[in-house]
C-alpha cells in the first residue's frame, strides 16, 4: 500500500476548483499520523521527516506538532526513550499553545506508552487518566475506549 500512495505523489493532479487539492504537507501529515497510530516506526521516520521539513518551511505549527509526535512514536518503538520524550513534549507544548484538546489527549496517550515502556507505571496511569478525561469531555468515544483498554492492560501488567 505504501508504494501505491507514494506513486500517487508523482501523478499530476488537477484541482476541481482553487484550493481543493491536497498539498504535499497535507498528505504527509495524514501519512505520518497514520504511521504513528499503527505504531509503524519505519513509516513514522519516513513520513515525519518530510512532514517536519514542510511544516517548518510553511510555518504550520499543527503539522509540526504532528511530526514531532510521529518522531516520538518512532523513537519509543526503537527504544530511544530520551529522544521520544523530547519529541513528544515538543508536540504537547505546541498542541497546548494551539488549544487542540484532542491532539493533546492523543499525545498524552503516547507519553503514557513511553512511561509504560520505561516501566514507570504510576506515571503511565496518570497520563492515561488525563488523556481519558480529555477524550470523555470531547465525547471522543473511540479514543476513550482505546485509552480505557490501555489502562486495563496496565493494571493487568501490574497484577502479573
Image (spheres, grey):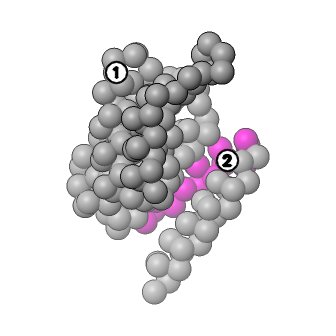
By secondary structure, the bulk of the magenta-drawn segment is best described as: helix
Q: Regarding mark 2 in the picture, which secondary structure is present there?
A: helix
Residue 131 belongs to magenta span: yes
Residue 145 belongs to magenta span: no
Horizontal and vertical percent position of residue 119: 35, 67
Location of residue 141 by image quarter: bottom right
Using the image as rendered, state which of residue 6 and residue 80 is in the foreground. Answer: 6
Q: Which span is picked out in magenta? A: 121-138
Q: Mark 1: few, some, or many residues within 10 Å (few <14, many ≥20)?
A: few
Disc ID at residue 69: none
Using the image as rendered, state which of residue 94 and residue 28 is in the foreground. Answer: 28
In the image, farthest residue toward the top:
18
- Dot 2 or dot 1: first in sequence order is 1
Residue at image point 50% right, 40% down: 30
Q: Is residue 137 left or right of residue 82?
A: right
- Asked if 88 appears above or below 73 in the picture, the reply is above
Q: Regarding mark 1 in the picture, which secondary structure is present there?
A: helix
Horizontal and vertical percent position of residue 90: 36, 34
Horizontal and vertical percent position of residue 118: 32, 63
- Asked if 80 appears above or below 33 in the picture, the reply is below
Residue 70 seen in the figure:
yes
Residue at image point 30% right, 47% down: 45
Q: Which residue is mark 2?
A: 135
Horizontal and vertical percent position of residue 136: 72, 49
- Asked if 148 appears above or below 31 in the picture, the reply is below
Location of residue 129 by image quarter: bottom right
Disc ID at residue 56: 1
Image depth: mark 2 or mark 1 in front: 1
Amino acid at each position: 500500500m505504501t508504494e501505491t500512495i507514494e506513486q500517487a505523489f508523482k501523478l499530476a493532479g488537477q484541482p476541481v476548483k482553487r484550493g481543493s487539492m491536497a498539498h504535499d504537507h497535507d498528505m504527509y501529515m495524514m501519512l505520518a499520523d497514520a504511521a504513528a497510530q499503527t505504531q509503524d516506526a519505519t513509516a513514522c521516520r519516513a513520513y515525519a521527516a518530510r512532514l517536519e521539513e514542510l511544516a517548518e518551511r510553511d510555518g504550520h505549527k499543527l503539522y509540526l506538532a504532528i511530526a514531532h509526535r510521529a518522531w516520538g512514536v518512532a523513537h519509543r518503538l526503537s527504544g530511544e526513550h530520551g529522544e521520544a520524550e523530547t519529541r513528544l513534549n515538543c508536540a504537547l507544548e505546541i498542541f497546548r499553545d494551539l488549544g487542540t484538546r484532542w491532539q493533546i489527549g492523543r499525545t498524552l496517550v503516547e507519553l503514557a506508552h513511553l512511561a509504560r515502556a520505561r516501566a514507570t507505571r504510576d506515571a503511565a496511569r496518570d497520563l492515561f487518566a488525563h488523556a481519558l478525561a480529555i477524550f470523555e469531555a470531547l465525547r471522543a468515544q473511540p479514543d476513550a475506549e482505546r485509552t480505557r483498554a490501555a489502562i486495563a492492560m496496565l493494571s493487568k501488567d501490574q497484577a502479573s
